[in-house]
Amino acid sequence: MLSFDGRLLKTLSKTSVKLRRLIAGSAGAALVLIGCQPQEQAATPVARVDDQVLTLEEIHARFDSTRGPSEAQVHEYIQGWIVNELLFREAVRQGFDRSEDLAMRLQDIRRQLTITAMLDADIYKNEDLSSSREEIVRYFDAHREDFTLTTDVALLSFAVFSDRDVANALRTMVVRRTPWNQARQEIARDPQRGITLIASADSMFYTQGTLIPDNLWRAVMGTPVGTPSFPIRTDDGYYVLMTWKMGRKGETADVLYVEPEIRGRLAIERRQQKMQELLERLRKQHAVEILGGPVAGDTSHSERSY
């Protein structure tokens, strides 16, 4: 449990973050207050410093609405609010709210928040993440050296049963040339055997660190690719594993395994291109000149800094 001094230091460290949120939300809050509002429920005051009142509803609005704050979180918030109010009132009394330094800092924060809002809307849209299959494969082929596996990776399907005999029946069907998905679906539709199917997954990548418990990975390493494993007993039930592909450490990864990373890279490239196009357009619209000094006439650095 933090001491009061510890909570004070923690509260002070968050001041700049809260200040940014206050500036960003002030315009929207003013519109809400001015506009038409439905009839509000009576507020529940929980703390007061002079004429400033904190309500329970304000505290709840600061937390996840699906869960709400715990009693301890409410108590900590109240203590932090009181500290901030006391310090703010003392700062105002000493005239710090009227200082030129604070005005400049507030102006800088407002500028950065305004720029960030524009970039979020124009540059960092979710659709920038979308890439076609052809784009992903083309990028993969051009950067294969970037996608060397650092550990063994297996592409697996599995089914988990509460009954060993049913698990073994699935394995037998697949060994006898029934396709994996067809065999699993036939068992799932069977009124008696289907109720023993606990879970299944199809064509997912696993490593030794992600396939738990450990005996499942040992079974993967000991079973040929394309052959279903014997039922493996675990606390969850009896697993039957089917390994479709096995990538070894040092080999080039399967494109499906690195697809999320490629999508992220392509999104970054698109955003960088959009930023460059935006800056080029803005430079044509505005008179930009560096006046005097050793870097006069060279404005390329400012563009690259974005």
Image (tube, rainbow, N blue to C red):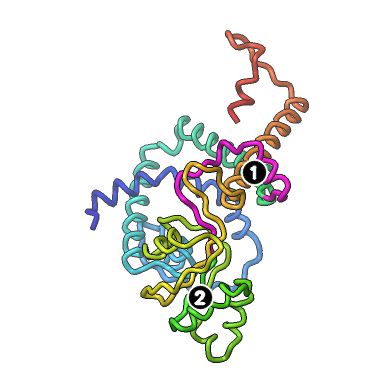
Residue 259 in picture, x, y percent from top left: 61, 49
Quadrant of the rendered structure where residue 217 is?
bottom left
Q: Are circles 1 and 2 on residues that touch, CB within 8 Å?
A: no
Q: Picture coordinates of residue 114 (x, y %)? A: 61, 41
Determine if the magenta segment contains residue 154.
yes
**Could you tell me how far apart the alpha carbons at marks 1 and 2 are, in whole angstroms?**
35 Å
Along the line of sight, which residue is nearer the eye, 214 or 16?
214
Q: Nearer the viewer, residue 9 or 305?
A: 305
Looking at the image, which residue is at 41% across and 58% down? Answer: 52
Disc 1 target residue: 267
- Position of the C terminus by quadrant: top right
Give the structural element (helix, strand or loop) at label 1. Answer: helix
| Image location of residue 8, percent across then percent down | 29, 49
**Residue that numbered label 2 is attached to:** 199
Which span of residues is magenta-colored? Answer: 130-156
Q: How crowded is mark 2: few (under 14 residues within 10 Å), some or many (20 or more)?
A: few
Q: What element carries label 2?
A: strand
